[in-house]
Image (cartoon, rainbow, N blue to C red):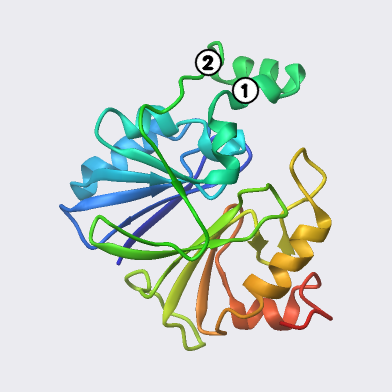
Amino acid sequence: MLTIAFPAAAFGTNCYVLATGEGEECLVVDPGIGVEETLREVLTEHRLKPAAVLLTHGHIDHVFSVTPVCGADAAAYIHSEDRYRLVDPISGLDQGLVGMLEQQFGRKATWTEPSTVVEVVDRETLTLAGLDLEVLHAPGHTEGSVMFGLERLPEGVRAPEELDRTMVTGDVLFAGSIGRTDLPGGSQKAMQRSLREVVLPLPDSTLVLPGHGAATSMRRERSTNPYLQGLNA
């Protein structure tokens, strides 16, 4: 699986491009703030065309560029409980933060809702751009936070441990940490349940591609992540 990752221009949000190979349709996961130019270069270099945009949740740092990336041809996929966030995620931001972003990028922050939005549900299987993905609902960071699982690995993965599958975890699970639960729509109780019932059962052979920071594995997180210690699946 061709897998390209790069950080957004703000908040270090990881944007992922997934495809079966060069010159094919692709999936764009979490196109955040200021990713358009880099994404355009990636698509041109690898001769890729977006078939869909997958959103792990509806926070602005993960969805800011979804509408221009989707264009008229590709749909945005988001869990039904975070669908409301795509109506106007900028309106809920602190005005100081909006001003900072506008100063950084030199233009007024505006929002246009994607023309085509597909709501996904827990345990749904999606077949897009030649890839099969499983949707795992894992609320806690937001009501509709999800992870996307694939029974594939990125090309060229070299690791000292046996890996045979990939999970794009958004802001549910990071290397050594988890997503915060103190923002609107967050819930520590829901996050604990998601970690126990959704994250911990993942096989140790799972490569974890998080919404921020470096890739990791379930084997590593199970043994070292303090937020998973003491939980029983």
Element under disc 2: loop
Position of the N terminus, as image quadrant, is: bottom left
**Residue 193 appears in view:** yes
- Left or right of 222 in this view: 75: left
**Measured from the top left, where is residue 97 in percent x and y?**
72, 23
Residue annotated with mark 2: 110
Task: Check residue 20 in the rendering and tell me which mark sits there, or answer none.
Answer: none
What crowding class fits label 2: few (fewer than 14 Cα within 10 Å), some (14-19), or many (20 or more)? few
Residue annotated with mark 1: 90
Q: Which amino acid, mark 2?
A: Thr
**Which picture quadrant has residue 40?**
top left
Q: Residue at x 61, y 83 (%)?
A: 219
- Left or right of 180 in this view: 86: left
Element under disc 1: helix
Q: Residue at x 40, y 75 (%)?
A: 157
Vertical position of residue 57 compared to residue 128: above or below: above
Q: In whole angstroms, how far apart are the C-alphas of marks 1 and 2? A: 8 Å
Q: Which amino acid, mark 1?
A: Ile
Callout count: 2
Q: Residue at x 51, y 19 (%)?
A: 111
**Measured from the top left, where is residue 162 in percent x and y?**
47, 88
Q: Residue at x 51, y 87 (%)?
A: 160
Q: Could you tell which of marks 1 and 2 lies nearer the N-terminus?
A: 1
**Residue 176 appears in view:** no
**Which picture quadrant has residue 81?**
top right
Vertical position of residue 184 compared to residue 18: above or below: above
- Left or right of 32 in this view: 191: right
**Measured from the top left, where is residue 87 in percent x and y?**
54, 25
What crowding class fits label 1: few (fewer than 14 Cα within 10 Å), some (14-19), or many (20 or more)? some
**Measured from the top left, where is residue 233 in percent x and y?**
71, 82
- Whether tag 1 and tag 2 are in contact, CB under 8 A, the answer is yes
